[in-house]
Amino acid sequence: MWWIVQCPELRCSKHMLVRARTKRKKCVYCNRSFKVDDNFINMYHEQVDAREMVKKFNSRLRD
């Protein structure tokens, strides 16, 4: 299972993919460390589906 999480940093707010049951994540864009449970967005069973959603979410941030 894969989870989509969002960086809590207001200037960043990017979405990332993490394995289910991960406790902490370091943002690959701004290097902020945060708790995954507090920033959970969605859950997917297949990694390919989750990747596509992360791409869509992040493309909306740029628009």
Image (cartoon, rainbow, N blue to C red):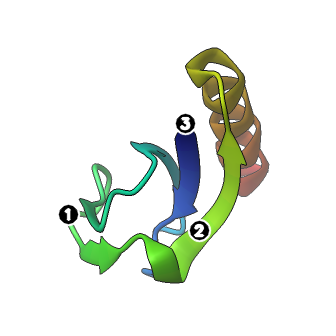
Residue type at mark 1?
Answer: Asn
Looking at marks 2 and 1 on the same chain, the residue that comes earlier in the sequence is marked by 1
**Residue tagged by mark 3?**
1
**Residue tagged by mark 2?**
40
Q: Residue at x 73, y 47 (%)?
A: 57
Mark 3 nearby-residue class (10 Å; few <14, some 14–19, many ≥20): few
55 relative position to 18: left or right: right
Residue type at mark 2?
Answer: Phe
**Where residue 16 sits: x, y (%)?**
48, 48
Looking at marks 3 and 1 on the same chain, the residue that comes earlier in the sequence is marked by 3
Mark in front: 2 vs 1: 2
Mark in front: 2 vs 3: 3
25 relative position to 3: left or right: left
Secondary structure at badge 2 equals strand
Secondary structure at badge 1 equals loop
Residue 31, disc: 1
Confirm whether residue 49 shows in the render. Answer: yes
Is the residue 3 above or below the residue 51 in the image?
below
**Where residue 6 sits: x, y (%)?**
54, 65
